[in-house]
Image: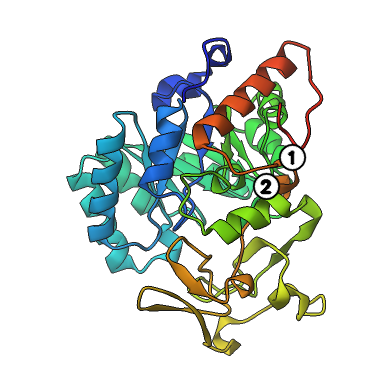
């Protein structure tokens, strides 16, 4: 369901660069942003990142193939070079290029050699950053778009500034298109980002709670039931990532047992207790793996990622409906007619 014609008048230069209709990006959520969600966002006019963090080249092939069968709209493949074994990363990029992928989205520390490789192949690079310094490094490496991720964001959070403060700091230093990410679930957030001078927003939590997302139904419902105050920033869910990699999750039995010591955990000192399964793959209590459609076991003790915008998400809807809601509300705000809505719904 594409956004209606009036809503599509919110068109920034970023839309022309990426080939989308509306300035709303789907975050490349690992495990969650699979082909079905990516296709739904693309067909609704947005720009998706297919979440392929540390996935095999074979899965990348099947996901890209399925995505292209479901839409002819452009998309990016999301990888995290700094948190991926170099040999696997090389194989991932090689396979993407063989498949003709024309845009990549990266996150965490900037790796200039990786960005340079993509640019040498003529592809676009969107780089998500958590600090103004990382934004400078991404631009110097050749990135085409900077995604400013604030501490309000769900999932892995790289910086400690708020999303709008970070975006404004980056906008003061770059001519590249800047996208705001973190805690944005409604059209008011999009309108605020555009008023700041950004060219769009990236949403994760708002799309996790959609019909097409690959998140487990329990995770989706926890997002709907949660308020922004129910989320915490912690690095206890750190297995599979570098030490100190913090994530924003909905508080659960694991975080409550920390007695306030949410940060400062060493992955080498955490036990490897299997608490859930995806087919024959065990999931550890303190791993970064979130519950997916295929997951069974102790889902409550797994990281249920959500940003501080969770309190504005009232229900699970198709991704196209979510985009339509955001765009309609943003249009009202930008036209000076902000409407009251219950938990972000018009």
Residue at the location (17% across, 46% down)? 98
User: x%, y% of residue 180?
Assistant: 62, 36
Q: Residue furthest left?
A: 98
* Residue 267 position (above or below residue 311): below
Helix, strand or loop at mark 1: helix
User: x%, y% of residue 167?
Assistant: 66, 37
Question: Taking the image as drawn, is residue 317 in sight?
Answer: yes
Residue 118, disc? none
* Residue 138 position (above or below residue 19): below
Quote the CA–CA distance across marks 1 and 2. 8 Å
* Residue 89 position (above or below residue 300): above
Helix, strand or loop at mark 2: loop
Residue at the location (35% across, 69% down)? 85
Q: Is there a contact, CB below 8 Å, between mark 1 and mark 2? A: yes
Question: Taking the image as drawn, is residue 307 in sight?
Answer: no
Tell me the crowding category of disc 1: few under 14, some 14 to 19, or many 20 or more residues within 10 angstroms, Cα based.
some
Q: Is residue 143 left or right of residue 291?
A: left
User: x%, y% of residue 38?
Assistant: 41, 41
């Amino acid at each position: 369901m594409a956004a209606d014609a009036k809503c599509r008048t919110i068109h920034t230069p970023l839309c022309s660069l990426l080939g989308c209709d509306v300035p709303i990006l789907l975050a490349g959520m690992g495990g969650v942003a699979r082909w079905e969600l990516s296709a739904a966002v693309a067909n609704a006019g947005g720009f998706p990142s297919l979440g392929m963090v540390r996935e095999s080249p074979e899965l990348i092939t099947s996901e890209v193939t399925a995505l292209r069968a479901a839409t002819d709209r452009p998309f990016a493949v999301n990888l995290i070079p700094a948190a991926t074994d170099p040999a696997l990363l090389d194989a991932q990029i090689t396979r993407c290029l063989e498949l003709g992928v024309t845009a990549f989205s990266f996150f965490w520390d900037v790796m200039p050699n990786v960005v340079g490789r993509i640019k040498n192949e003529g592809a676009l690079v969107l780089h998500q950053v958590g600090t103004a310094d990382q934004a400078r490094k991404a631009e110097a490496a050749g990135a085409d778009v900077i995604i400013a991720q604030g501490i309000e964001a769900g999932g892995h959070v790289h910086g400690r500034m708020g999303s709008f403060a970070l975006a404004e700091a980056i906008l003061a230093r770059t001519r590249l298109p800047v996208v705001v990410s973190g805690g944005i679930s409604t059209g008011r957030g999009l309108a605020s980002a555009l008023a700041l001078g950004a060219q769009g927003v990236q949403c994760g939590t708002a799309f996790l709670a959609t019909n097409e997302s690959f998140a487990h139904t329990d995770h989706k419902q926890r997002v709907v039931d949660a308020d922004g105050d129910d989320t915490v920033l912690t690095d206890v869910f750190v297995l599979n990532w570098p030490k100190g990699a913090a994530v924003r999750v909905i508080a659960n039995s694991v975080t409550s047992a920390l007695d306030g010591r949410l940060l400062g955990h060493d992955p080498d000192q955490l036990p490897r207790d299997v608490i859930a399964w995806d087919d024959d793959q065990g999931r550890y209590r303190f791993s970064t793996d979130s519950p997916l459609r295929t997951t069974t076991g102790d889902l409550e003790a797994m990281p249920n990622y959500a940003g501080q915008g969770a309190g504005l998400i009232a229900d699970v809807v198709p991704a196209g409906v979510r985009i339509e809601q955001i765009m309609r509300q943003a249009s009202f705000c930008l036209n000076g007619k902000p409407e009251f809505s219950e938990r972000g719904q018009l």
